[in-house]
Amino acid sequence: MQPDLFDSPAPAPKPRDERTAALYRDLVKLGDMLGDGMGDEPDGKWIRDEYRRVAKALGHCPPRRNRGAAIDVAVSKHLETNRCECGGLFKQTRSGSLRVFCTACCTKYRLRESKPAKAR
Ligand SMILES: [Zn+2]
């Protein structure tokens, strides 16, 4: 690297770079906290969550698994047993999407992830 090759002033950092730098600072800070074992304390879960969030924002996470196939199966199952309020048939908006729309009235719905439903 020869930073002095050009004598023009360094370009102002782009907002995105600042954001990235801030994320890195957070990541290091959170990483230190996790290293101290704080993430394993009863109220330390947020640290792990936050660390994961920041790492993800920086693109440090393992590549997203392709959940498309699983989603398609779940959605098509849902479509078999559900109808729109108007009685119309649902259709998946596109492959891998949790969104469906009613072919009769065009209302869009977002299916929930197939996690166990919360008891109400
Ligand atoms: Zn409808």
Image (cartoon, rainbow, N blue to C red):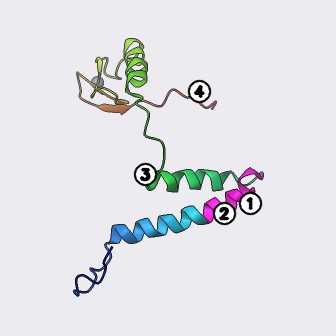
The residue that disc 2 covers is 32
Judge the density around disc 3: few (<14), some (14-19), many (≥20) Cα neighbours within 10 Å. few
Q: Could you tell me which secondary element the residue under label 3 belongs to? A: loop
The picture places residue 110, in percent across and down from the top left corner, at 38, 33
Sequence-wise, the earlier of marks 1 and 3 is: 1
Q: CA distance from mark 4 to mark 2?
A: 34 Å
Q: Nearer the viewer, mark 4 or mark 2?
A: 2
Q: CA distance from mark 1 to mark 4?
A: 34 Å
Q: Nearer the viewer, mark 4 or mark 3?
A: 3
Judge the density around disc 4: few (<14), some (14-19), many (≥20) Cα neighbours within 10 Å. few
Judge the density around disc 2: few (<14), some (14-19), many (≥20) Cα neighbours within 10 Å. few
Our reading of the magenta stretch's main secondary structure is: helix
Q: The C terminus appears in which quarter of the rendering?
A: top right
Residue at image point 38% right, 30% down: 98
Q: In the rendered structure, which amino acid carries the disc numbered 1?
A: Asp
Sequence-wise, the earlier of marks 4 and 2 is: 2
The residue that disc 1 covers is 36
- Label 2 CB sits under 8 Å from any ligand 1 atom: no
Q: Could you tell me which secondary element the residue under label 4 belongs to? A: loop
> Is residue 100 located in the magenta-colored stretch of the structure?
no
- Residue 74 vs residue 32, the one in the foreground: 32
